[in-house]
Amino acid sequence: MRHLSQATRELLRAHGPRYNSPRYDRRQILGLAGAAAAAAALRFDVAPAQAQGEPVKLGVVAIRAGIAAPVGAAGLRATEWWAERVNKAGGILGRPVQLVVEEESNPKDTVERYRKLVLQDKVEAVLGGISTGVTLALGPVAEDLATPWLSWDGTTQKGVEETMPNPKWAFKSVDNEVEAIVAGILTPKYFKGIKTVAGIGNDYSYGHDCWQSYQAVLKRYVPDVKFVLELFPKLGVTDFTSHIAAIQQSKADLLMCSFWSGDATIIMKQAAAVGLFKTMKGVFTTAGGVHDSLKKEFTPEGLLLGYNTMYFDDPKGGPLLKQFVREYKAKHNEYPPYECDHAFFNAESYKAAVEKAARGGRQWPEKAAVVKALEGLEVESLSGRRSWREDHVQMCNFYQGITTHKNSYDFVTISPVEVVSTKQAMKPAGAKLFDWINGWKI
Amino acid sequence: MSQHVVNVLLSGVFHASILFLVAAGLQVIFGVQKIFNLACGSFYALGAYVGVSAVGWYTAAGGPPALFIVPLALAGLAVGAVGLVVERGLLSFVYERDETFQLLLTFAVVLMMEDAIRLTWGAAPRSTAGLYLVYGQTHLLGATVPVYNLIVIAASLAIAVAIGWLLTRTTFGRIVRATADNREMAAALGVDLRRVYAKVFTLGTALGTLGGALVIPATATMSEMGIELIVEAFAVVVIGGLGSMRGAFVGALVVGILRSIAISTYPELEMLLIYLIVIAVLVLRPRGLFGGAAV
């Protein structure tokens, strides 16, 4: 691969002014990572593709700084893996994929970079977007610029309500609160006799929405359950000892936690230090995002742990997942988190939509035809079959289960693995969340 | 009930111990150099990251787990040398300029340090795995207390005493206090301000990096961890009095314990309560509880 990169970099320079300069900034280097694979294909594997035209440029917006940087990095790595794989197989309609990577930061700057991707870099589509604060702003811009945008993990929800029910160009992630709903469904199955629950989540929309949704669902299954404490520390807090003292004092039967970053690791460690889970059950809806930091030394067995839409160690996982996990581990020395699956699905579904819209020909389809082809499209992703709902929301499975130490890793995994579809756990298009939950027949 | 009181108080004091080390670094630098060092939080984060790496190497080399605190503390102290680089390489050029320049420069260090940390250690959180629990737990009035928390509290207290001794009982301390009181007079009497500034800034930095290293077994590194602490350190220095070490000690205790009580009673008021006290101090006693005292 190293040998190919040098050769391919020379080839890429021939594709335009972007690669003419020998000096690369960080963005270009990351862009090159994906593009290098494209050129590798050009030179060594699918020479005819070069003759058929320029590489197809796909924009990627990825968080690379701050708390969500590991999530953004995972999405970007998976997209690069996908690009390499596609290019080795001949590209999309014979055109190799070239990724143009931009930073996802605050809404204002990200919108400007998004515009640059579409107007200046002239990308065919934009992939990515994690923070709903950012993607709420990107949605209308995507509509305005009339270029397909497929969001990894960001929605256009305000709280739990959809703000763009009928988009044309914007394709969005699953609703933010789905993993809390799944946890609410599974809690009474694994933790019988729960009467009191304490909750802790980050002090922003996701944390609050998850807590409200979890309460609404659990109340349907256990009508007399009491919610005795709610804590919402700010993102970035690294000392939860005072929060844990408050949780101990609440004497709740169960703690629900929607942390998804390093804070999940920290609270687990600090809770273990005072033996919190010796007397209390635990539900960690999203901590699977940092699964390999949940070491056995401080993460007990018997907790309900959510892995969002991909469980790297799924015993029923297909060959694609196994290959990805193996290669990801070899390259990055860690096991892939769920964001990889969102990113892979976005890119793979875009490819499938282009091929579907081309109707077996080699002519590159119009963007409008591609978004039409995306609606309802189902493809094989890392976690299995995933699809786009007609209103442009991802449909997939959620993986949660009970933590176990019986594995060959130094961190916990889950067994049994529960798989819950968004068909069951996500509100239907146009529905109001709490009306929908309250209407369940249980 | 007593169990809960112990939990709340000890968690508050534990938080205060870390806050004290960072705020003490802030205070000693401000007291002598009159620079409000926004980068104190970044030094704290740097100490945490270096601490994780040091413990990682120590563990990989087969060092006994019970002694991990030795390489941890040594790494935290050693990386304080970065203060010398920042002081000589950057700050020494702006001493004669307006305070705004100095503030902006230390803010630039915050941003640069964040990128440098990300480039070196990556964006993923890092931790020292289960070493936090190596020393086990003890029981106090029915409450389970991690022994490591007690070690951090004791270390912080020992450092407070050591700094007090350093500043009041040694020649270096007398020179530092003289410089803090009147730098022109000190210079006229033959004090080499360049050396004093370099030493003081390095000391202030080492307090922050040591704080970061000591806390890391109980938590995990996150790129924003420094910023979060700066906000609280501000409250500590305003309450305690800018430039005062005793102020840093008392201010850290006030903020740490109040925060803990607020989280246990009215969690929504956590920051509001602390900053209400900050406002009260600013209005009623603008110099802080120990303001005006020379370092």
Image: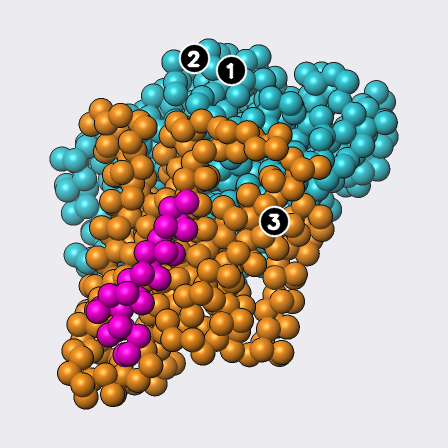
Chain colours: A cyan, B orange
Q: Residues within 10 Å of mark 3 (few under 14, many from 20)?
A: many
Q: Do discs 2 and 3 share a chain? A: no
Describe residue A231's horizontal placement relative to residue A15 as left or right.
right
Residue at the (25%, 45%) spot, across then down: B75
For mark 2, name the chain. A
Q: Is label 1 or label 3 in front?
A: 3
Q: Which residues are magenta?
A: B154-179
Tell me the element at label 3.
Answer: helix
* Viewer-proximal residue among B193 and A175: B193
Q: CA distance from mark 1 to mark 3?
A: 33 Å
For image coordinates 76% across by 29% down, the residue present is A196
Mark 3 lies on residue: B260
Comparing A269 with B153, the one in front is B153
Q: Which mark is residue A407?
A: 2
- Residue type at numbered disc 2: Asn
Q: CA distance from mark 1 to mark 2?
A: 8 Å
Residue A120 placed where, x, y %?
A: 40, 61
Report helix, strand or loop for mark 2: loop
Say which of marks 2 and 3 sits in front: 3
> What amino acid type should be assigned to the residue bearing mark 3?
Ser
